[in-house]
Image (spheres, grey):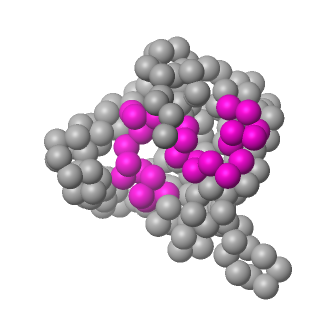
Amino acid sequence: MRALPALTRHERHFDADDVIVSKTDLKGKITYANQTFIQLSGYSEQELLGAPHNLIRHPDMPRCVFKLLWDTIAAGNEIFAYVVNRSRNGDHYWVFAHVTPSYDLNGKLVGYHSNRRVPKRQPIDSVIIPTYKALVDVENQNPDPRAGMEASLGVVVNMLQEKGMTYDQWVLSL
């Protein structure tokens, strides 16, 4: 696997009217990427197609949020989430993602579809960044990545139970 460049700490932005669109198969391999996704990610269409979607995973993004996302869509439900992605050159960009399962004409789950829009900045700065940092810290405290992810997922579940909300309700309330 190709070594990733160092993080630049430079944030990329996209227009409020733009929508990032991608589709994946059931294993998370990219089957479609629109021009906005190609441009922000810094990868060519050829590099993206067939690649795992986690190619753009930023290290500041808690693994437990992706576990929650994948568990939700694999169960046939949609989910909303704030996500920070990593561009090919080490830049980053924030999105407000809406991920849904995709079905064929017979109702069989065949993949996933994600639309991402420009997120509201205030919740990112005041809630999401500190929350995600705390979750990544929990994940990194355990030398076993799976155990760290499960521990941070427990933190999310407890937070949501205390608020009496689902993850979507929490995200949409921000």
Quadrant in which residue 46 is drawn:
top right
Q: Position of residue 69 (x, y in %)?
A: 49, 57
Q: Nearer the viewer, residue 93 or 131?
A: 93
Q: Position of residue 26 (x, y in %)?
A: 61, 67
Q: Residue furthest front?
A: 1
Q: Position of residue 124 (x, y in %)?
A: 47, 30
The reply, left or right, for residue 17 in relation to residue 148 is right
Q: Is residue 81 visible?
A: yes
Q: Nearer the viewer, residue 150 or 26?
A: 26
Quadrant in which residue 102 is drawn:
bottom right
115 drawn magenta: no
65 drawn magenta: yes
The residue that appears at 48% across and 15% down in the rendered structure is: 8
Q: Position of residue 142 (x, y in %)?
A: 17, 47
The residue that appears at 83% across and 80% down in the rendered structure is: 105
Q: Is residue 23 above or below residue 2?
A: below
Q: Is residue 91 above or below residue 56?
A: above
| Region rendered in magenta | 43-69
The residue that appears at 46% across and 16% down in the rendered structure is: 9
The residue that appears at 47% across and 28% down in the rendered structure is: 4
